[in-house]
Amino acid sequence: MSSQAVAHIVVIVFENRSFDHMLGFLSGDELSKEMIPVDPNDPSQGFVSPFILDSHDDVSVDPGHSYPDVMEQLTGSTGPWPPGTTLTNQGFVCNYARRAGKEVSKEIVGCYDDDHVPVLWTLAREYAVCTGWFCSVPSETWPNRLFVHAATSDDTLRNDVRLYWNETVFEQIDATHRDWRVYAGDIPQVAAFARLLWHPFRDRFDRLDAFFEDARRNRLPAYSFIEPRHFLRTANSQHPLQQIRLGEQLLQQVYEALAANPKVWRSSLLIITHDEHGGFYDRQPPPSAVPPSPDSRNSEYDFGFDLLGPRVPAVVVSPYIPAGTVRNETYDHTSIIATVREAFGLAGPLTDRDAAARSLLPLLTLSEPREPVVIPAVPAEEVEEAIAETDENRWAQGRTVGGEIKLNELQESLVRLKQLLDREQTGADAPTIVPEPRLATDEDVENLVADFQLRHIDPS
């Protein structure tokens, strides 16, 4: 199949779930035979095995996913981790136990099946699942999302709230006179690339709902990046402790929007992944990686960006992909950039990392397009139940003070990003909406999101 048949690439990146957590039982029950020590340094503490969850219940607390957490999960050691340190993936339970308590430590190896994530499982079976897709860096959300767009994290390993000026795939698309759009659920992390947000053509960021109208009207750009909702009770990014069913509903809506328009369906490639593993167990140690440049290094942890992070779910949908396609080769988030570059004839790579990345276009092997398959719907009553449970989890996680709710680290970073963008745009200090310790009322957050959309998505 010629890459010329791909006129629209749609990418949706969810939050913080590992491959085994979401898709590990897709090929059978081999995962259940894994034995993970409660304490890698004390075998007498016993072992636990991955299991299929009885319900949609999430973990008790947000698992650790900073660089030190991830390296402990991968090595079973609290450090240091010099180059060449053996990776065993045996430290997940002990790392989570320190955060949540030993009595619930088994939660971290709980996995979903097709009863829990029927949309993702159906798309994985009917199109392509990549079993060797790793996040780009063994750390948290911001550095991994930066790699999705720029094939580098600018040497950061943290949710480092600042503006980034690295060249991105969006600018390379501009150079080919194609269009692109970011469809934002609320405050998108990609807005940290301020040149994109303040693009000369100000319509390059739009509300999430606009994606469905654009698909219906044959107005999809060449490249669509979908960033789900991160805030409030209808958040659908699947970040713990948000209900995964809301993300399933969004994925269903995105797929069906493409499938409903024959012209769009025949010319589209949909890439579905998660930015990082979120601390959830995965059995496969990550491989080495090509650093973005020879001098790439994080001085805080003496890390040379020569190791990928844990595996994350990755499903690729196209009418030119045969049902049941399984690819075991190594991919990371910069494979998205490599795919866009090959499909649209972009200029050379952004960094050495995406230069070495594997494109997804070889998955499209059919000469004629298939008709879209029917996928399961997320029942309305389950959506309402998921919203209620997400709301309950938000209150349970925070110490409420006058109706305030504790934000997770990602949400707080996006609030700070919004305030930073406001200062840069106006030259004035933006008010501090979220005081320590990251408490805010729903009304505060609703107003913040509305103001972001008014300033940066719908400016008059």
Image (cartoon, rainbow, N blue to C red):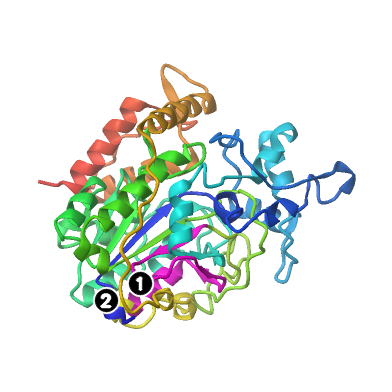
Observer able to see residue 412:
no
The kind of residue tagged 1 is Tyr
Q: Please name the residue shown 45% across and 34% down the image.
A: 407
Q: Secondary structure at mark 2?
A: helix
Q: Which residues are magenta?
A: 313-342
**10 Å crowding of disc 1: few (<14), some (14-19), many (20+):** many
The circle on residue 262 is none
Front residue of 396 and 420: 396
Reply above or below: 151 against 19: below
Q: Is residue 432 visible?
A: yes
Report the residue at 66% width, 46% height from top: 109
Which residue is labeled 2 in the image? 5
Q: Quadrant of residue 249?
A: top left
The kind of residue on which mark 2 rests is Ala
Mark 1: secondary structure: loop
Q: Which residue was labeled with disc 1?
A: 320
